[in-house]
Image (cartoon, rainbow, N blue to C red):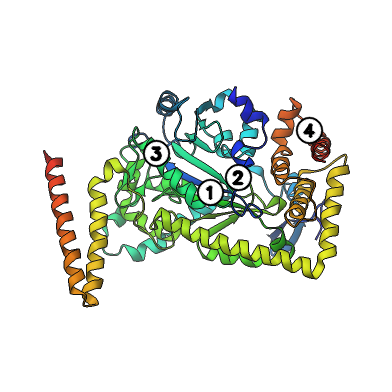
Amino acid sequence: MECQECHERPASLHFTQVVNGHKTEVYVCEKCAYDKGYMSQEQDSLSLHNLLSGLFNFDSFQLSDSKSHSASHREPQTLKCDHCGLTYDEFKRVGKFGCANCYKTFDERLNPIFRRVHSGNTIHSGKVPKRKGGQLHVQREMEQKRSELQALIHQEEFEEAAKVRDQIRTLERQLDSEQREGDQ
Amino acid sequence: MSLEQFMNEAISPWLKEEGPDSDIVMSSRIRLARNFDHIPFPILADQEELEQVVEFFKEEYEDYSFGPYKDFEFIHMSKLNPTEKRVLVEKHLISPHLSDHAKHGAALISQNEQVSVMVNEEDHIRVQLYFPGFQLEKALEQASDFDDWLEEKINFAFDEKRGYLTSCPTNVGTGLRASVMMHLPALTITQQMSRLIPAINQLGLVVRGIYGEGSEAIGNIFQISNQITLGKSERDIVDDLKSVVEQLIEQERNARQQIIQQNGIQLEDKIFRSYGVLANSRIIESKEAAKCLSDVRLGIDLGYINSLSKTILNELMILTQPGFLQQYAQQNLSPDERDVRRAALIRERLNLEI
């Protein structure tokens, strides 16, 4: 279909306008959409943004999600990051965190957002920085071994299971001594 | 001196090599988003904090090398004119956001242009690593090593539960965006893309045009990337993308064969008409140029055209963008002037080849 304004380029956008119950439809190309004021440049560059902050308007979601902790419910407006000053309302509007500490401040409200954006996931299971992750690496490995152990027991492969159990014990000792070192 | 190279060579050195499956996958990219632990993200950081980040990168990494990525050039965005910034965007070395919106933005680019680190984009650090053709695993491996190297000096914002912390919730966790640039003319001609795109979306992947968010697929080039960054390991993210790309490659190859068998002469006609347009026009818009370049590239891949190399088309795709045309002309050009220049440039390059 060609653009109804310039009759040159193909129409790539479709606008429907309803004024007093009267509906008009136009098919225009991108250039005419800007030139004739159907769409402003600014609006366009923000569209993804709007979409994102739209995603965060999950209040109905949250109501059912947080019936148990009514505390967060009573003062929903005052939540504010004490490191960068971003309030939860601003976060919801802009769709961006202000600093690392925001993640802690808004923590209990983030699961529904992450679930939506990341197909139901809320917990990281990828790379861990070496510097921070000494203990975390060991913990990850232990978790893995434990589920391996469960599977082996289930399959009644007790000899293999005993080996894995010993490996878990070694990891536990390692974690223990690292923690003691860290405390000193 | 190397800024000059970045500006004048349309085709990055790494793109001149031919990677695996390069008849369909033009390039593979890994991007990692990272932030400094105690500094607010660029959106809320003050002047001083942003400058601190820029200075740190200049001090620690300017002229350094990491493995094959030699002599990092450090570039302040404020020192570039709009055309120069546009050229870097067209070469995918920086993002439009860094070029137009970032306060105290900078970039660290290796001589071979394979690695670029954007500083103070939406996050403090955005590492990008490119490989020619379909080499996602290799790119991930190298990006991860590079990340370890940065980590030796930087305390990244990281949380045990949420992973690497980023300004936008869509990047949290791994901070990883893996993507491939694919040339899919046959799937487009046979109108299969409109059916495939929703299916790909359902798998948690995003299909976009060549210049990222919101851009359309000019020249039948599609960028496919992961949407999910949280709750999956880097390896799994890349594996999932890889398996979809493998299927797309196969489908594109089948579609090409199908067209040759059923409409061979029509396809050949279309390809040579486009070649004719490129070789003879005096005025050409970027969209038409991209369409014709896509046809000619397909003609080369299928053996209809033997007199041209594949890289000349990669080169022309970038060289005929507005920024490059103006850089080449050393002046600002109106859209009409650009269309004339573009046509002249394409004719000139095609003649050089024969």
Q: Same chain for labels 3 and 2? Say yes or no.
A: no
Please state which of residues A59 and B199 is positioned toward the viewer in this rendering.
B199
Question: Are the residues under marks 3 and 4 on the same chain?
Answer: yes
Tag 3's secondary structure? loop
* Residue indicated by mark 3: B35
Quarter that holds the C terminus of chain B: top right
Which chain is disc 3 placed on? B
On the image, numbered disc 1 is attached to which residue?
A49
Kind of residue indicated by mark 1: His
The answer to whether marks 3 and 4 mark residues whose Cβ atoms lie closer than 8 Å is no
Left or right: B20 with respect to B231? right
A99 vs B290, nearest the viewer: B290
Residue B80 shows up from this direction: no
Relative to B179, B146 lies left or right: left
Q: Are marks 4 and 1 in contact (CB under 8 Å)?
A: no
- Which residue has dot 2 on it? A45
Q: Amino acid at mark 4?
A: Ser
Q: Secondary structure at mark 4?
A: loop
Q: Crowding near pointer 3: few (<14 within 10 Å), some, many (20+)?
A: many
Q: Residue at x 29, y 55 (%)?
A: A72
Q: For mark 4, name the chain.
A: B
Cα–Cα span, label 2 and label 1:
8 Å
User: Which residue is at a point 24% across and 77% down the rendered structure image?
Assistant: A155
Residue B81 % position (x, y): 63, 25
Q: Do tag 2 and tag 1 residues touch (Cβ < 8 Å)?
A: yes
Distance in Å between CA atoms under marks 3 and 4: 40 Å
Q: Quadrant of the N terminus of chain B?
A: top right
